[in-house]
Amino acid sequence: MRRTKEDANETLRRLIGVAKRHFAEHGYAGAALEAIAAEAEVTRGALYHHFRNKHGLFLSVLESVQQEVGERVEQEASRSDDLREQLLLGCRAFLVSAVEPGNKRIMLIDGPAVLGWDTWRVLDEKNSMSHLREQLTLMQEQGMFKDAAVESLASFISGGLNESALRMAELPDTSDAMEQTMKLMSHLVGAWDQRH
């Protein structure tokens, strides 16, 4: 009997979900395709039908994590009508999402190491970075950051957030670091906008 596209999509979602748990718990090197296939209740052949290899599976997992983080950034930012508050809410959502146990190893540690920074940046560009750039463009259209190049400002903020997330990922409790980072972010956004 021929499998439907819906069945194949469900298998794909299940494999990515199981693989995400394995990569988060064991890291890329420690995750075994046999264990992932067994927990997802598929044959190893079915796994290879969807993904050429472990690298391909990890790429899909990282892409799904980046997409989830981007969606959370957008959702959190939309809680306010104030453009500055939207920016800050989105930045906080990025940090919170990035350091969650199920995401931090995949997104911050193994992602760049396994796939390289170029691939990691392409995925970030499609998700969190695109939301950041859109927000900054909207703010500039409303008279904020008048003398700033949006690309430069987006890279500056994104780089700071990524470094902050990497630092927080190493801490047992991120609450103090989160508040300090957001206080600094709020100050920088306010100071830049007032002077430019």
Image: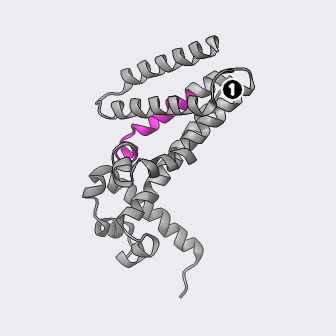
Q: Which residues are magenta?
A: 89-107
Q: Residue furthest bottom?
A: 1
Observer-nearest of 145 and 14: 145
Taking the spot 30% from the left edge, 55% from the top edge, the residue there is 28
Give the x, y percent position of residue 158.
50, 33
Rendered-image quadrant of the C terminus? top right
User: Which amino acid does the dot numbered 1 rest on?
Assistant: Met
Disc 1 target residue: 139
Depicted 162 relative to depicted 192: above or below: below
Taking the spot 28% from the left edge, 30% from the top edge, the residue there is 172
The image quarter containing residue 109 is top left
Taking the spot 40% from the left edge, 32% from the top edge, the residue there is 163
Main secondary-structure element of the magenta-colored stretch: helix
Q: Residue furthest right?
A: 142
- Per the image, is 71 magenta? no
For mark 1, does the 10 Å Cα neighbourhood hold few (<14), some (14 to 19), or many (20 or more) residues? some
| Number of marks in picture | 1
Taking the spot 41% from the left edge, 24% from the top edge, the residue there is 178
Observer-nearest of 4 and 149: 149
Depicted 152 relative to depicted 128: above or below: above
Give the x, y percent position of residue 99.
39, 37
152 relative to 109 in the view: left or right = right
**Can the viewer see residue 161?**
yes
Q: SS at mark 1?
A: helix
Observer-nearest of 51 and 194: 194
Give the x, y percent position of residue 138.
70, 30
- Per the image, is 94 magenta? yes
